[in-house]
Image (tube, rainbow, N blue to C red):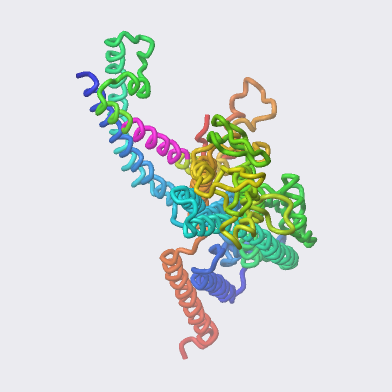
Amino acid sequence: MTSTFHSIETAKRSLFAQQTSINTVGHNISNANTEGYSRQRVTMTAARPMEAFGINRSTSAGQLGTGVEATAINRVRTSFLDDQFRNQSKYLGAWSVQSDTLNKLESIVNEPSDSGIRTVMDKFYQAWSDLSKDPENVTGRKIVRETALALTDSFNQTSKQMQDLSADLTSSIDVKATEANTYINTISSLNTQIRRIESLGDDANDLRDQRDLLTDKLSQIVNINVTQAPEGYNISMGGTNLVAGDTVTPLTPAALEAAFQTGDLNSGEVFGMITSRDVYVADYVKQLDTLANTLATGNIQVTVPAGSVLPGTTTPLATATTMTVQGINGLHKLGYTMGNPATGADDFFTFKAGATGFTAASMQLNANITSDTNNIATSMRTTTTGGTSTVVVGNNSLALLMSGLNEVKFTFDQSATGNGISEATINNFYSSMVGALGVQSQEALRQYQNSTAQTEQVDSNRQAVSGVSLDEEMSDLVKYQHAYGAAARFMTTFDQLLEKLINGTGVVGR
Amino acid sequence: MIVETIIATLEEQADIYVQLLALAREKTPYLVGNKVDQLNATMQKERKLLKRAEELEQQRMRLSGQYFSSLGMLRYKGGKITEMIRTVTSPQEKLRLTELHAVLRDSLEELQKVNQLNQQLIEQSLKFIDYSIDLMVEDPSNDVTYQHPQSAGYQSSRSSAFDTRG
């Protein structure tokens, strides 16, 4: 036999359960725009029927229900999609950084343009060509000097910008390591909080959402593997444990570099940064250095015209002679300066104090030439009268040879560049470098766009499952409101019944 | 002139591949956003173009076979455009063929890359669908225990929600 007041309790449970649902709907609506929030749902089940055993068991027909119970509040989420998302977002991270770096490299190289190395080099050859028409002209000499300065400045500047980019990437790695550590620490403390709350039997939905959101963010920085254990999320990067329950292994830039070497770090933004710095930027710096070095000292074949007097000799060449000289410097040293008596010319380019060889950064115009343009050699002829050699100042053989260098093939040190070019004109080498950069950049951009599309797809799938639909929530709200109203009505009705029972019984209508 | 016919065919082919490329690019956002209706509509258009592309390819192969036969170069009967460019004598035709060759090569290469992305997107969706179905349907290969061969009744006792497989 159930209690007389049984239905009061049923109505109360109903009111409570519907109210819980309404509150959950309210929570969903208020978090409609919260990043990483997944919608929550109340699980309602019929409450356990009370039926005593043995002699107290009611003999009345059927079993009377005892109302409803809200047994759990769960979040609607598919962990499979989380895994898919994290798997894609690491590629997105890596390619976005690589594409960005290559883009910056492209703007540093800045070709084709009026200020790129190529244009500056063309102007340099053009200045020599102009000088060859009037080798004694002071203005012509100054123009050669200015264009040579512009050329070395271009090399210095490009190299400096690339070094800066490399340094920027290094400091970005530090920043990302700090960011990743923040996430790792928070995830681990969330692990502890979630375990504490869930040990009481509740679901820590909102904390779990936060933990998933942070894990998603971490997955973009480094490649991670997430496993769910009783003590919370265990996160590892390759073979390196980052989070195990409440134990944290913080990331340091040095540890990240080491993981890059061992292959534990194989994706994510940090991977993109290290690859960009050590592969792309380092490679272009090396190519540019090789270019500068070869321009100054790389072997070339030149044909010295008949009548020229080689330095250290006094007899003019009877026939045109082809010989190998070492770059612009070697060629310049075949000529004579404007000084009297005839003095052999010095190196055209030198490297800055402290440097050990020609690089794009260390290359500069010989200080003698910078201070006195008479040290630019144009002539290859001397005349000897009475034991003293005098330079033939009107001769333009060297200026002609210099201006012809843009068509001459230089010998490149292939082992330094590794791009398979051993002999090419400076222009060809440079265009192949710029071309390769363009292709790499285009490919990186494509990969970036592809991984963006794939990440968007998983995210939209995830939103379809976990996102808050305001329409749906509004219809739920109406549904639960009706149920709440009906439950209240039921309670009023039962109250009236009891009023009759208590006030009307035994008075027989008096 | 047979070369003119071939050029006309190639022009139409190039045009079709450019259209196919546009359609393939159109498909990507539909795949990302799970818009199946629009995807179906695009694929209808694509199907028509593909049919035409196949016809044209057959026609081109036949024509270029005839062309190389007329030159007595039976070895090249398959007919690559590059070989044709080498053998054609008129400069206008040579130029036109070179241009078409570039257009065809670029658009096909791009088409392949876009299709690759679309394929990856489809694979990703399919993985989720496969996973969702696996939640409800038991994998038939999970019948790892021995059963009495004559009692067929046991086999129907699967604990899956839908019995769609085997």
Quadrant for residue A320, please give it: top right
The secondary structure that most of the magenta stretch takes on is: helix
**What residue lies at 46% left-to-right and 88% top-to-bottom?**
A509
Q: Is residue A192 left or right of residue A400?
A: right
Residue A14 coordinates in the image, percent (x, y):
54, 71
Decide if residue A287 is in sight here: no
Q: Position of residue A58 (x, y in %)?
A: 64, 63
Q: Is residue B109 magenta?
A: yes
Nearest the eye: B41 or A492:
B41
Q: Is residue A184 visible?
A: yes
Residue A11 is drawn in which quadrant? Answer: bottom right
| Residue B49 drawn above or below residue A218 | above
Magenta region includes residue B114: yes
Give whichever of A104, A334 is nearer the camera. Answer: A334
Q: Which residues are magenta?
A: B100-116
Query: What residue is rendered at 31% in x and 8% in y?
Result: B72
Residue closest to the eye, A44 or A52: A44
Residue sitting at the far front? A386
The picture places residue A433, in percent across and down from the top left corner, at 54, 44
Q: For residue A298, what is the image quadrant?
A: top right
Residue A285, above or below A37: above
Q: How many marks?
A: 0
**Which residue is the extreme one toward the bottom?**
A510
Q: Position of residue A31 (x, y in %)?
A: 52, 70
Q: Nearer the viewer, residue A235 or A29?
A: A235
Q: Is residue A224 above or below residue B109?
A: below
Residue at the far left in the pictured view: B1
User: Which quarter shows the N terminus of chain A?
Assistant: bottom right
